[in-house]
Image: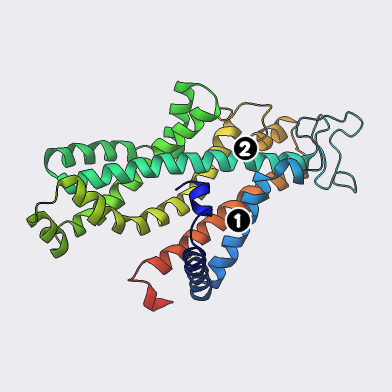
Amino acid sequence: MSVTQIGELPAPVACSLLNRIGRALWYFARRSPMSAFWGIVALAIVLVAIFAPFVAPFEPLRSDFRHMTKAPDALHYFGTDQIGRDTLTRVIYGSRASLAVAFGAVLLGTTTGALWGLASGFFGGRFDIVSQRIIEFLQSFPDLILAMAIAMALGSGTGTVIVAIAITRIPFGGRIIRAVVLSLKELAYVEAARGLGASNLRLMARHILPQCIAPYLILATTHLGVAIIIEASLGFLGVGIPPPMPTWGNMLADALNSGLIPPWWLVLFPGAAITLTVLAFNLLGDGIRDVLDPRLRGAL
């Protein structure tokens, strides 16, 4: 539906849609207030990344050689790095790169794994056996090692980092969605639709796939934190997004390259940004899981 079509919706329909969204958000906040708080924190971080040019006090690549490696003061709240660039500005712009990579990798990897798991669980047989062996092969590598090997093989760049991290997310989406599909495809309503002549594509798209949305959302939210850590690790190791584009991992690597004892503010603030963002998305994912998983609703 296009923006024009949304604007042309009748007023009662638009109000009903807004009311449903509002009730859903209120239900989530009431059932899991701590997760709702961290959801607000995650939303704030995303908004800061989107509006970085309006929020950041300086240009991210601007050097001030009169204020090189200066501690936080009234002009530079987070201090400056070894060539006089404002650390606060680079932390803000670093959130753009880190979140863009994380969202892109999770969307690509989790979606690919989910669709693969859907087909594997539904069709079974040899296709399922081969698929599970490939997934087991991918899972035999630590996530960071696999992502680093792929990034080094494909070369540096934002797209390369997204693909490298996405490949590490595929096995998790494939396994979990496959397990959900195996429990769904034998249910009575699926068998009834098959008996009425529904095609395999219709069975998967109309009767099974909608039931996989909740676990998919839980996977995507919780994997965002992992993707941010992997991206920062790749940048720290020098195989992520290349300089001069600021990322949190690159900033930590630059800080350690500035001397035997790096200035504390060059380590503290990028590290705190990584920690806060990962914590926010992880706790938001836990809250979504608690609300959407019927087995956990009674414990809330």
Q: Nearer the viewer, residue 150 or 237?
A: 150
| Marks 1 and 2, how far apart at CA | 21 Å
Counting other residues with Cα less than 10 Å from the Cα at mark 2, is it few (<14), some (14-19), or many (20 or more)?
many
**What residue is disc 2 on?**
249
Q: Amino acid at mark 1?
A: Leu
The local secondary structure at tag 2 comes to: helix
Note whether residue 142 is visible.
Answer: no
Q: From the viewer's perspective, is 81 left or right of 172?
A: right
| Image location (x, y in percent) of residue 126 | 12, 38
The quadrant the C terminus occupies is bottom left
Residue 43 numbered mark, or none: 1
The local secondary structure at tag 1 comes to: helix
Q: From the viewer's perspective, is 37 left or right of 149?
A: right
Note whether residue 242 is visible.
Answer: yes
Identify the residue at horizontal 76%, vertical 30% (top origin): 61
State which quadrant residue 119 falls in. Answer: top left
Identify the residue at horizontal 37%, vertical 37% (top origin): 141
Please, is residue 146 above or below residue 229 in the view?
Answer: above
| Image location (x, y in percent) of residue 152 | 48, 24
